[in-house]
Image (cartoon, helix red, strand yellow):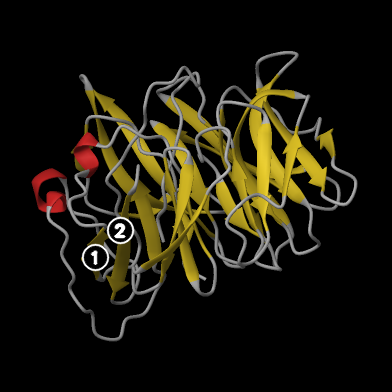
């Protein structure tokens, strides 16, 4: 499922907002998104996504045999959201029971039926990256600072906040099955893409020196294959997506893409990487959800494109 994406090609605060489409569903553009709609879908096969644009959230549902099935927009919330005009750089995440949607300096908590039941507060920046771990703790980056806030299940304020002196800014976050946390951002030393590993018990961040690049995009852990996926937003017209072994942090695969991919998501296993792709089109962006073949990097399928005044931020798979 898609989620929200963030960043500018050089993390220069060029707002990236997007209306997204997802495998299992499609996000419609601009005017159609200004009015929330709910289309109950029959049973479907495939992968569903949540996609967010600022505080606007979409459930995307894909029905049919991938990749030849059809896309359907399932719902848009909260009421009154117009993704084309959303100014925020925020992330989104989903656990087995809840959806977490970034809203400026807070995170709204929704049930899967899109009823808001709470708000996470106490953040010191923009919730660009959001993820949950195996214990369903929620982790939120405080972009553009270099800090990360952790929320225990049921908590509405941070249980702990960690600062990473290795980074000048922290963008995205992911968690593995062993409780380790990974963050991507810009190196305080070189200004380049850096990925660090946090051991929550010690509070120490360790740079993963084998991972590099230009501009930090999304990161995601693939649990059953033991891979850490890292997106490099590159130069604004092309970038790369790479996988690294979680045991050695040596690169396993890498493929190039055109445009700007920000947030990425991967299923627990299987040869697929999902991303929101932004291509500069004059003063706007042409945005679409893309499924890449994880081995070859070829586009396996893509959702219909739409135009956005701002860059898309993130994506997440439904759990």
Whole-percent x, y for residue 127 in the image = 51, 41
User: Is residue 281 among what the camera can see?
Assistant: yes
Residue density around tag 1, few if under 14, some if 14–19, many if 20 or more, within 10 Å: many
Q: Position of residue 141 (x, y in %)?
A: 60, 40
Mark 2 closeness class: few <14, some 14–19, many ≥20 residues within 10 Å: many
Above or below for 53 versus 111:
above
Residue 134 image point, x, y percent: 70, 67
Which residue is disc 2 drawn over?
A: 58
Q: Are marks 1 and 2 in contact (CB under 8 Å)?
A: yes
What residue is at 65 percent from the left and 50 percent from the top? 174
At x 32% / y 76%, what residue is drawn? 65
Looking at the rendering, which quadrant does residue 70 occupy? bottom left
Residue 134 shown left or right of residue 129 in the figure? right
Q: Tag 2, which secondary structure? A: strand
* In-image side of 199 versus 92 (left or right): right
Q: Name the residue carrying label 1.
A: 75
Position of residue 253 in the picture relative to residue 258 (left or right)? right
Within the image, what quadrant is residue 54 found in?
top left
User: Label 1 vs label 2: CA separation?
Assistant: 6 Å
The residue shown at (50%, 35%) is 126
């Amino acid at each position: 499922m898609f989620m929200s994406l963030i960043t500018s090609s050089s993390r220069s605060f060029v707002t990236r907002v997007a209306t997204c489409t997802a495998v299992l569903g499609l996000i419609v553009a601009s005017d159609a998104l200004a009015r929330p709609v709910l289309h109950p879908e029959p049973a479907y096969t495939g992968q569903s996504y949540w996609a967010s644009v600022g505080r606007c959230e979409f459930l995307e549902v894909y029905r049919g045999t991938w990749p030849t099935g059809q896309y359907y927009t399932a719902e848009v919330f909260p009421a009154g959201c117009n993704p084309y005009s959303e100014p925020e750089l925020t992330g989104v995440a989903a656990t087995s029971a809840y959806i977490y949607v970034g809203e400026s300096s807070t995170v709204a908590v929704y049930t899967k039926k899109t009823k808001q039941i709470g708000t996470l507060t106490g953040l010191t920046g923009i919730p660009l990256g959001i993820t949950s771990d195996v214990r369903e703790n929620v982790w939120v980056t405080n972009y553009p600072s270099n800090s990360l806030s952790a929320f225990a299940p049921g908590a509405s304020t941070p249980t702990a906040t960690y600062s990473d002196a290795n980074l000048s800014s922290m963008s995205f976050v992911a968690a593995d099955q062993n409780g380790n946390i990974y963050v991507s951002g810009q190196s305080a030393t070189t200004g380049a893409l850096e990925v660090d590993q946090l051991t929550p018990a010690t509070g120490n961040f360790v740079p993963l020196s084998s991972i590099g690049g230009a501009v930090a995009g999304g990161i995601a852990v693939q649990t059953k294959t033991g891979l850490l996926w890292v997106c490099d937003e590159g130069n604004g017209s092309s970038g790369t997506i790479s996988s690294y072994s979680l045991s050695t942090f040596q690169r396993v695969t890498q493929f190039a893409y055109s445009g700007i991919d920000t947030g990425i998501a991967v299923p627990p296993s299987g040869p697929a990487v999902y991303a929101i792709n932004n291509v500069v089109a004059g003063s706007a962006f042409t945005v679409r959800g893309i499924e890449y073949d994880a081995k070859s990097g070829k586009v396996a399928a893509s959702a219909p494109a739409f135009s956005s005044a701002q860059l898309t931020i993130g994506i997440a798979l439904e759990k």
